[in-house]
Amino acid sequence: MTPQRPRYAPMPEKPSLDGLEAVWSGRWEAEGTYRFDRTRTRPEIYSIDTPPPTVSGSLHVGHVFSYTHTDTIARFQRMRGREVFYPMGWDDNGLPTERRVQNHFGVRCDPSVPYDPAFQPPAKPDAKRQIPISRGNFIELCERLTIEDEKVFEELWRRLGLSVDWSLTYATVDGLARAASQRAFLRNLARGEAYLSQAPTLWDVTFRTAVAQAELEDRPWPGAFHRVAFTPTQGTGERVWIETTRPELLPACVALVAHPDDERYRPLFGTTVTTPLFGVEVPVLAHRLAEPDKGSGIAMICTFGDVTDVVWWRELDLPTRAVLGRDGRLLPDAPPGVPAQPYGELAGKTVHGARERIVELLRAGGDLDGEPRKVTRPVKFYEKGDRPLEIVTTRQWYIRNGGRDRELRKALLARGAELSWHPPHMKVRYDNWVEGLSGDWLISRQRFFGVPIPLWYPLDETGEPDLSSPIAPDESALPMDPASDVPPGYTEDQRGRPGGFVGDPDVMDTWATSSLTPQIAGGWGRDEDLFSRVFPMDLRPQAHEIIRTWLFSTVVRAHLEEGTLPWRDVAISGWILDPDRKKMSKSAGNVVTPLGLLEQYGSDAVRYWAACGRPGTDTTFDTGQIKIGRRLAIKILNASRFVLGLGEDGAETGEVTEPIDLSMLARLAEVVEEATRAFEDYDYARALERTERFFWEFCDDYLELVKVRAYGEGPEAASAHAALRRALDVMLRLFAPFLPFVTEEVWSWWREGSVHRAPWPTPYGLAERAEKKDLLPTVAEVLGHVRKAKSDARLSMRAEVARLTVTGGPAALVRQAQDDLCAAGAVEEFVLRESEGDLLVEVALA
């Protein structure tokens, strides 16, 4: 339980927003306002699978946008009486961290370099002349830099007012995360869900690592079609012309393919042709994926030029002639069956260099028809890469995800249907991704900083590893690193020697760890009592572009391990767009960092802008909206000071008797109901919109109408005091999830404890006379006519009105508040004429 604190300070003479963040974030931490009470039972707990931000740079307003959305929900659930499990993780795993370390310290990892326990990075690092260091030293620098980044991130999150329990932080490469990731992998392996395969792999030649399907993106890339001739092996038939953008892969050609219904090539099916330059005999085959209207309608199959080549190779059971190495250069030796010449002229060249040379050879041999035809086509890239991906044959680890198993795919689609999606239309992205999977989840990466694959392999008498018999550690030994730890029954001096062992050199894909955030944060495998109280979690908040990666992979892991969903609800946030309606991103160079905004406008103002963004909707960054939020926060201070300056402590418990006071409370009761329904549907923006609209009506209309009476004495004044304070109490609680600092400040002027541990308001006790709810807006409309008349006449709002005449059906309502109306409008003579029809107002100025 949160300790009750005495009043923070008396109400100041001149309330200000300045400095509230430092005061209250410190108090919240010291008093454990958001500390999770783990003694509560699962039905009493609301647990959140908080996205761990990538700590490889700086936060931008897009992070502030989406994390504010989650925080409003956490605060609402806490006020509803749920004990909120709200941890924060740091995603320090993967390529972004390695790149940042390389550039920051001017180093690069070289596993052949021995570990130096006294190593210090260069005093003046040069990102262009990086010095090689050992894997151990490189990992130490990764850990060192991420710790520094995490401190900066935490400071900013505290300033923003995230109601996170900061004792529940984790990192995706710390010991707890490594142990959980390795434990899950070993169990996947034991159940046959993880497997090793030598297969064509999408490969980034810059980062020298495999890339999974979920990490791909298509980008337009310039190229050229080359019209190249193949010669029939038998007879004197005409040469067969194919068009290709990758002539450098001719030595990797294993077949030609055309559509089975293409009349032009039906006579060739079942025959063979020879490749130009190399004279290798290859078959002509039929396949439904061939496109008759593309180029010449017949294509060469190479191993491998693109993903379609892989499909053809697999389904047509073709041989492999690999020519491309992991470095993006052609291999030094020709594949089996391909003559050493002219292959030797291509060996060791880059793809571009090999293409230029082979075009020269084709032209010289008369096998190239005309000049290459330039074209721009979509090419697959690693989402963080700068060069087109290649396909090389490598040994990789996979986890089954339904890409090759129809029954598993159906089960994962059913899991998506079990989820409650907010907004609902986001579910189609999940369905489309699962239905479009073309293979299992590739989880191994050829990098250095990450969670190691927790396996060793025995070496035979020649020193070759037996990949079919991996040696797994006991779960009690996790986390482990096969590069430094020794398998059971072996000694360190047997590492790398015949008859000894070798560790798996790879690390896991970052999503293989991030897919376990509910388990890692919830204490799976290390704190089963906590895990039973928070898992499955209640909410996964995240952006829509990673539904295919983070959301899906988390569903896969929970389905395989626990046989359940990892959470019940998913709340999807949109992107932040720049003024040109382009997505803000570091790569685009159009991001806005939040610290300056928080300093200039205050955290509540920035949170207000964020909370105005609808769930799942892309939102344009707008400082104008932030300014509106600051004006709102200032108005809350000033209006609260006015209200609390009237009456005595405990005035809100008095009886509310005046009709217009009852009308205001009845309308507030409706706001409470609407805001509650909106929050229950995860529509925080609608809850804020409805609360804010009432607040301005309260300030602009109700306060002006009752001001004179409230300054007086007697039961009429006491009614105003009770209504004002009761309304302020409710509005502070309605605003608290959005504007935590200003609401806490005002709450401390007259309430015990924290507003963020106060109960969420209910409509009961506010709507004693619900039939009067139309009174306030009707009287406010009349007052609006009075104000307009004075404004049109360029008179002060204090100017007197000689006569105010109100006619129409609603006139009877106005009679119930005529004293307040006349006082607010400085009306000398007030005339009411009840009649049929709409409300009519006549203002005669003095």
Image (cartoon, helix red, strand yellow):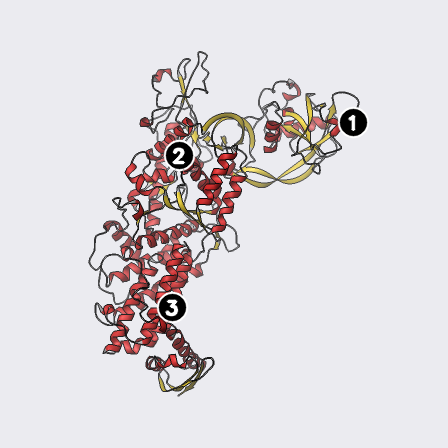
Quadrant in which residue 239 is drawn: top right
Answer whether residue 397 is visible to the viewer in this image. yes
Disc 2, SS: helix
Q: Residues within 10 Å of mark 2 (few under 14, many from 20)?
A: few
Q: Which mark is residue 238?
A: 1
Which mark is nearer the camera, 2 or 3? 2
The C terminus lies in which quarter of the figure? bottom left
Q: Amino acid at mark 1?
A: Glu
Q: Residue beneath label 2, please?
A: 561
Q: Considering only vertical position in the picture, is 418 above or below 210?
A: below
State whether residue 589 appears in this view. no
Identify the mark at residue 696; answer none if there is no mark. Answer: 3
Nearest the camera: 396 or 839?
839
Number of other residues with Cα within 10 Å of mark 1, as a class: few under 14, some 14 to 19, many 20 or more: few
Please tell me which of labels 2 and 3 falls first in the chain: 2
Q: Nearer the viewer, residue 233 or 353?
A: 233
Front residue of 100/86: it is 86
